[in-house]
């Protein structure tokens, strides 16, 4: 029995189904099914009632639940105590450009202060390319956005959600995001970036007709063009993203807007998993830290 199987068991109990647990732990549903069968085999009992759909906890499973919860909590407490002094090694990490200039510098500073023996080597690229490098083993993990888990050999751990907003030059006077993207030249987030595909789908779903002026693949380049009055754009609202070098005006969409989901992808079985977990913990703490909101 591994702590990973216990975490998955808790995810099934909380989510109410194997499918919900698969989304929560960043694995395929078939992988969750295999894990839970292995857990049952180890205890020699049935933890799930498979006579109903979706399967729920059996009576024994409900009895087991609080003990599994305490076991996972105890492991986490032990890991935190030990990791503060024993974390060391070399982590090859890929990062998409908008994260490498967003939350990453703060996270790396916190990581260096807390774990001075851990060295992180960074490589920048688009999500699709970085995931390929993780699969080939040239990267230990990658921070990407909007990854759809389709490979049973990979693990996806989201840690940040960023709603899409419109950024416009300061002199733009319209108040509605929908009006801005249809009135002014549109600077598109490249479709080669997965967030660019989400933006494209959102425009089609809302039937928003834009006049494309250019397509760029980094948030910093887009922001600079908007700042200089060359058009408006739809981008993720980064946590803690203030005025910066190129201040712009921000507009929110009426009704629910899609979100960019940022997370870490790694191989399911690899030697650096513990180091990735340390990084993930630091990133979650940085995301939870209060940040100034950008001016509207």
Image: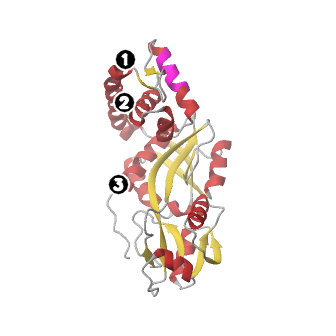
Which secondary structure, mark 1? Answer: helix
Is residue 99 placed above or below 39 in the rendered structure? below
Residue 251, how many percent across, how many down?
43, 74
Which residues are drawn in magenta? 34-41
Which secondary structure, mark 3? Answer: helix
Please tell me the numbered disc located at residue 60: 1
Mark 1 packing: few (<14 Cα in 10 Å), some, or many (20+)? few
Which secondary structure, mark 2? Answer: helix
Whether residue 225 appears in this view of the structure is: no
Q: Main secondary structure of the magenta part?
A: helix
Q: Which mark is first along the chain, 3 or 2?
A: 2
Does 67 lie within the magenta span?
no
Work out whether residue 28 or residue 83 is closer to the camera in this orientation and state it. Answer: 28
Residue 292, how many percent across, how many down?
33, 68
Residue at the disc numbered 3: 288
- The residue shown at (32%, 34%) is 77
Distance from label 3 to label 1 (Cα)?
A: 36 Å
């Amino acid at each position: 029995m591994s702590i990973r199987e216990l975490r998955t068991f808790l995810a099934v109990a909380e989510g109410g189904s194997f499918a919900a647990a698969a989304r929560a732990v960043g694995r395929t549903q078939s992988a969750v099914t295999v894990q839970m069968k292995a857990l049952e085999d180890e205890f020699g009992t049935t933890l799930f009632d498979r006579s109903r759909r979706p399967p729920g906890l059996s009576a024994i499973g409900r009895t087991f639940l609080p003990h599994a919860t305490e076991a996972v909590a105890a492991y986490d407490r032990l890991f935190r105590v030990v990791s503060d002094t024993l974390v060391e090694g070399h982590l090859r990490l890929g990062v998409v450009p908008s994260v490498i200039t967003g939350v990453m510098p703060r996270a790396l500073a916190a990581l260096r202060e807390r774990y001075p023996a851990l060295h992180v080597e960074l490589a920048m690229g688009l999500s699709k390319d970085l995931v390929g490098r993780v699969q080939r083993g040239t990267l230990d993990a990658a921070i990407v956005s909007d990854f759809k888990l389709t490979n049973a050999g990979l693990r996806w751990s989201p840690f940040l959600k960023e709603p899409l907003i419109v950024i416009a030059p300061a002199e733009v006077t319209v108040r509605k995001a929908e009006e801005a993207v249809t009135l002014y030249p549109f600077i598109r987030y490249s479709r080669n970036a997965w967030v660019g595909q989400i933006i494209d789908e959102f425009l089609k779903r809302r039937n928003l007709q834009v006049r494309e002026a250019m397509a760029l693949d980094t948030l910093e380049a887009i922001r600079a063009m908007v700042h200089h009055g060359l058009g408006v754009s739809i981008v993720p609202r980064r946590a803690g993203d203030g005025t910066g070098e190129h201040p712009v005006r921000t507009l929110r969409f009426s009704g629910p807007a899609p979100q960019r989901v940022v997370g870490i992808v790694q191989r399911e079985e690899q030697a650096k998993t513990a180091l990735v977990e340390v990084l993930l913990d630091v990133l979650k703490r940085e995301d939870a830290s209060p940040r100034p909101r950008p001016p509207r």
